[in-house]
Amino acid sequence: MKVLLIRGNPRKTGLTQQVTDRFLKGVLASGADVTDVDAVALAIEPCTGCYTCWAATPGHCIHDDAMKDLLPVVRAADVIVFSTPVNYYAMSGSLKTFIERLFPFFAPGIERSARGYFRNRCRYPADFGRKKLITIVVGSLRHLDTFGPVNETFRLIADSLDMQIGGQLTRPESYLLQFTRSKPKTVRLIEQAFVDAGMQAGTTGCLSAQTMEQAAQSLSVDDRHFETYSNIYWDRAIRMGAAANLASLRECISREPAILMREMARSVDPKATARVRAVIQMDFPDQDLHYRLTVDRGQCDIREQPTPEPDLRITCNASVWVDFMLGQLDLHEALRGRQIVVEGDKALFTRLGRFFPPPS
Ligand SMILES: Cc1cc2nc3c(=O)[nH]c(=O)nc-3n(C[C@H](O)[C@H](O)[C@H](O)COP(=O)(O)O)c2cc1C
């Protein structure tokens, strides 16, 4: 299987690059023959719309640049993969420029596409009819509807060039992929979906519905969590200023009490707390942070505010609690050394591990 990967992402440390690298890992593991092209680095000329490639020099463009060598590679590929960040609900400019330069593959005249639309004639129908198109789109927003336009554009492009869609990988909430410690299992599942997709692309050229669903699965439980987590993320980025990059932010956000505490509340075990009604106060005096967790028969509400008379009060430095939540602290030693101070219902404290399972 010949797989041609075209990357349209300008940021080489970015999240599109990261998930596409995982996809590539899968393609390589499948044993397929891969060509990995960075459309941004190609710096090709844009299509001028002169139609010279249709009439004066059929199949040949006026520009003498990297596309000259790439057009035969596109023709020969069994699977083409377009990878792009979502920019203003669309593909990136570099990928769009690359796709526009595929214009010599059309010939003058009109015919019907597989979807029943009019399109220009396909110059090399034998090469394109068997080709699969797979797309990878990565955006920071949550609502999948907003990824509809870019995905539909790719479907129309495939239809116009007489290619079949082999699968579409959509990754929303891209920044939440940075939550490797507060959402460890879900992030791992998503990352694995991209490797699996690459493997499927390299073997059959078609992605399974299950893999596409796994790649697109939500990292935030609802809109409210997405909004809160995104705002915390960008607030930390602003505070870091010039030091903010994806790696430093991942480290910072992994140890963010505001997120870990919300994940703790969200992960409350409804069975273990089915008959529990209690107010737990967490105080982090070093950061002047106070969380009130109200456990009420299977549910847990969290508020960032102090409570005068909770059933249980836990006081410690935020970093101590973060270490504990991430499994990096011996609780008994921390209690003995009074790094963590527990007041009120001590029996309730001993049951917290059952009420709040580790981050998933
Ligand atoms: C100019 C610009 C426009 C963007 N428009 C959107 C958008 O319409 N929808 C969206 O979900 N994300 C949008 N984003 C966010 C990117 O998709 C996001 O940063 C994502 O992680 C992909 O970029 P990356 O590969 O550099 O990380 C935009 C980012 C930029 C810089």
Image (cartoon, rainbow, N blue to C red):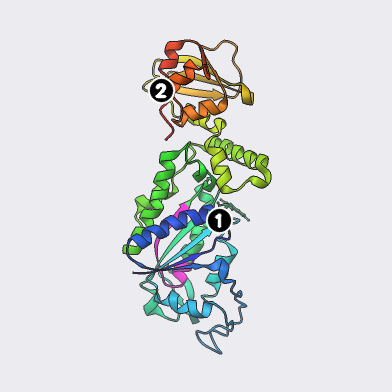
The CA distance from mark 1 to mark 2 is 40 Å
x and y percentages locating residue 216 in the rendered image? 44, 48
Count of numbered tags: 2
Q: Amino acid at mark 2?
A: Gly
Quadrant location, the N terminus: bottom left
Residue 353 - label: 2
Identity of the residue drawn at 40% across and 28% down: 357
Q: State the residue at coordinates (34%, 59%).
A: 199
- Region in magenta: 157-170
Residue on which the image places disc 1: 86
Q: Per the image, is 158 magenta?
A: yes
- Is 129 placed above or below 286 here? below
Q: Position of residue 304 (x, y in %)?
A: 60, 24
Residue 73 falls in image quadrant: bottom left
**Disc 2 C-beta below 8 A from ligand 1:** no
- The residue positioned 54% from the left and 35% from the top of the image is 255
Q: Is residue 157 above or below residue 190?
A: below
Specify whether residue 226 is in view: no
Quadrant of the snapshot with the C terminus: top left
Please identify, in this view, whether the residue under mark 1 or under mark 2 is nearer the observer.
2
Residue 297, visible in the rendered structure: yes
**Left or right, residue 13 beside residue 169:** right
Circle 1 packing at 10 Å, graded few (<14), some (14-19), many (20+), is: many
Q: Residue at x 54, y 63 (%)?
A: 8
Mark 2: which secondary structure?
helix
Magenta run includes residue 25 = no
Q: Nearer the viewer, residue 290 or 151?
A: 290
Q: Which residue type carries mark 1?
A: Val
Q: In the displayed structure, does residue 270 sit left or right of residue 48?
A: left
User: Quarter-wise, where is residue 234 in the image?
Assistant: top right
Queried on whether the Cβ of the residue with tag 1 lies below 8 angstroms from ligand 1, the answer reads: yes
Q: Earlier in the sequence, mark 1 or mark 2?
A: 1
